[in-house]
Amino acid sequence: MDRRATLRYICPMSTYDHDHGSELSEMQLRVRALESVLAEKGYIDPAALDLIVEEYETRIGPQNGARVVAKAWTDPEFKTRLLVDGSAAVRSLGYENRVGDHLVVVENTDRVHNMVVCTLCSCYPWEMLGLPPVWYKSAPYRSRAVKDPRGVLRDFGISLPQTTEIRVWDSTAETRYLVLPMRPSGTAGLSADELAALVTRDSMIGTGFPKPAERA
Amino acid sequence: MTDSIHDMGGMDGFGKVEPEPNEPPFHQAWEARVLAMQRAMGYAGAWNIDMSRAAQELLPPNVYLSVSYYKRWALGIEHNLLKQGLADAGEIADGRARNSAKPLKRKLTPDAVPAVMTRGSYGRPAQAPARFKPGDRVRAKNIHPRTHTRLPRYVRGHIGTVELVHGCHVFPDTAAVGQGENPQWLYTVVFDGRELWGADADPTIKVSVDAFEPYLETP
């Protein structure tokens, strides 16, 4: 094996890398080399990569999940179906067909607060919420969410009554979990679009609440 | 590897969770290319999702903790290219192909991109009846395979309750090592916080994992 590559693989922070400056410039070069060799060998088409990046940057984000949540808040029959079979209910809306087969929607109530984590890596319902934020993939969240969820919620500025059950869902398989947050009070007259604007990404992970009505 | 640093549930000392306001999808352009390459190589059949996870789990703990998320992905891609014989180390280092390519199942072209933007399906026909049903008490086995597994350490040996049955799914433990899909029943098993973290733990906490049937036994 090429000595430089071996060094970089076994010890990416080695002196070899430091000769090339920060991780940023090192990675720019390294990833460019990787893409070049894969394209030269005919394994990938860079134009397809461009489209994937564009999808993640422009069309996939928490607005998808927010529309599902607002629909559930305004349509009891849909909400029932959503909680029984999340994938089928979301697909029935027509505008979101990326959801796959394994979406489970879990409902927050006065009694139970749900929170989602992937302790082993970064499993996340990206088709509903976009790419996971850095904190979701970070060691502090992954290590503590299953042992000290109340402490994690405090990091987000949230405090729940000591009587509320906290239910943590560790996504260890290909099942994906979306939290259905409680509808904020004082929103009776709002349309589904107005309600969707109140639904935050973190409220659908279980590390936040929807915005209150007056801040819509 | 099973008992490596990626299995973080319950560890102390990593500090506070620090959310970033208005975080962009990517912080650097190269991160986006890494993600897109992973998707494209998956579509091509170069390796499966479990192999990409397993490759990152091979990183030594000091490396795993000190590099960024997408750098781990890039290192995993390089590892799998070598492992599958799709490129050699010199080619990867220099960004130039010298040897002929190895045939892959297919190639991701722009018109096929919508296919990789839909989440894959991992459900498979059942090979046998489910051994457990909702409400059953089960113990997560005390196993320490030398290869990839999705049973986190913090539940091993502990007793929980089956809550959901998800059908039969591709079994990561075999798929990750190229031994096939070997579909297994998948359950959501919920544990009381005190069962996992001791009698002094917060009694209002419940934690579930999704556990494949081979991870579980009758207590």
Image: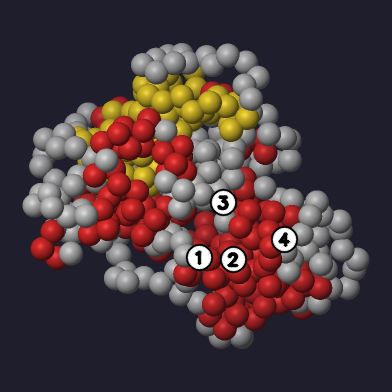
Relative to A186, is B38 on the left or the right? right
Query: Mark on residue A56?
Result: 1
- In three-dimensional space, the C-alpha distance between marks 1 and 4, rounded to whole angstroms, equals 17 Å
Q: Splitting the image into 4 quarters, where does residue A52 fall?
A: bottom right
- In three-dimensional space, the C-alpha distance between marks 4 and 3, rounded to whole angstroms, equals 14 Å
Relative to A210, is B180 on the left or the right? right
Relative to A52, is B28 on the left or the right? left
Q: Amino acid at mark 2?
A: Ile
Is label 2 in a helix, a strand or a loop?
helix
Q: Nearer the viewer, residue B171 or A62?
A: A62
Image color mode: secondary structure
Query: Mark on residue B118?
Result: 3
Q: Amino acid at mark 1?
A: Tyr
- In three-dimensional space, the C-alpha distance between marks 2 and 3, rounded to whole angstroms, equals 11 Å
Mark 2 packing: few (<14 Cα in 10 Å), some, or many (20+)? many
Q: Amino acid at mark 4?
A: Leu
Q: Residue furthest right?
A: B100
Asked if disc 2 and disc 1 are in contact, CB closer than 8 Å, the reply is yes
Chain for numbered disc 1: A
Q: How many marks?
A: 4
Is label 3 in a helix, a strand or a loop?
loop
Residue B75 in picture, x, y percent from top left: 63, 63
Using the rendered image, report if marks 1 and 4 lie on a common chain.
Answer: no
Query: Mark on residue A52?
Result: 2
Mark 4 packing: few (<14 Cα in 10 Å), some, or many (20+)? many
Q: Amino acid at mark 3?
A: Thr
- The residue at the point 62 percent across, 48 percent down is B49
Residue under label 4, please give it.
B108
- The residue at the point 67 percent across, 78 percent down is A32
